[in-house]
Image: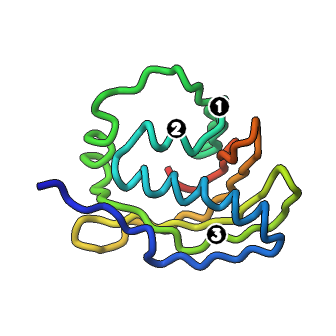
Amino acid sequence: MLDNHDHESEHSVDIVVNSEPEKAALEALTLYMKSWNNRDIEGMDAAFHFPHARIASGQITILEKDRLRSQDFFKSFIENTGWDYSLWDYRRAVQSKEDKVHFAVQFTRYRKDGTSIGHYPSLWIVALIDGRWGVQARSSFAP
């Protein structure tokens, strides 16, 4: 039997002001974390717009939709970090217009026993492109 990695409703404090675009954009973050915890790369891709920029560990990485991914991405990540699941600590819309929202977020990575690996504040930029909200870029303190 597969482990249940659905922690979507745990720990998050969401602050939105401009209700329509911010609530709609928040769905992309929810989809990403749900897909991440379920080890679902296709779901993660569905939460993004491509090209997608990630700034972390002193590097800027541009992700393209058609890039090849290692089949053992999650296996390797788990072996290297001890990670089992992640939760949003908070997701705060800090700037928004009708087609773009900047979120200050923080997430925590957890081991299988529920102990914390670390807390990681980040800035995520979610855009409405071709009628769909998706994460366009993120800057994170996570390794």
Q: Which residue does the numbered mark 3 point to in the structure image?
A: 91
Residue 83 found in image quarter: bottom left
Q: Is residue 5 left or right of residue 31?
A: left
Q: Nearer the viewer, residue 102 or 106?
A: 102
Please tell me which of labels 3 and 1 falls first in the chain.
1
How many residues crowd around disc 1 within 10 Å: few (fewer than 14), some, or many (20 or more)?
A: some
Residue 50 at x, y percent in the picture: 65, 31
Distance of label 3 from label 1 (alpha carbons): 22 Å
Q: Is residue 74 above or below residue 114?
A: above
Q: Which mark is residue 142?
A: none
User: Extreme front residue here?
Assistant: 131
User: Extreme right residue here?
Assistant: 97
Q: Is residue 8 above or below residue 142?
A: below
Q: Is residue 97 left or right of residue 125?
A: right
Asked if the residues shown at circle 1 and circle 2 are in contact, with their CB atoms under 8 angstroms apart, the answer is yes
Determine whether the residue tagged by mark 1 lies in a helix, strand or loop.
strand
Residue 81 at x, y percent in the picture: 32, 52
Q: Nearer the viewer, residue 105 or 32?
A: 32
Distance of label 2 from label 3 (alpha carbons): 20 Å
Determine whether the residue tagged by mark 3 lies in a helix, strand or loop.
strand
Q: Which residue does the numbered mark 1 point to in the structure image?
A: 50
Q: How is the image coloured?
A: rainbow
Count every numbered label the image shows and give the total.
3
Label 3 amino acid?
Arg
How many residues crowd around disc 3 within 10 Å: few (fewer than 14), some, or many (20 or more)?
A: many
Q: Which mark is residue 45?
A: 2
Label 2 amino acid?
Asp
Q: Residue drawn 53% across and 20% down?
A: 66
Label 1 amino acid?
Phe
Q: Residue drawn 83% across and 50% down?
A: 99
Q: Is residue 119 above or below residue 98?
A: below
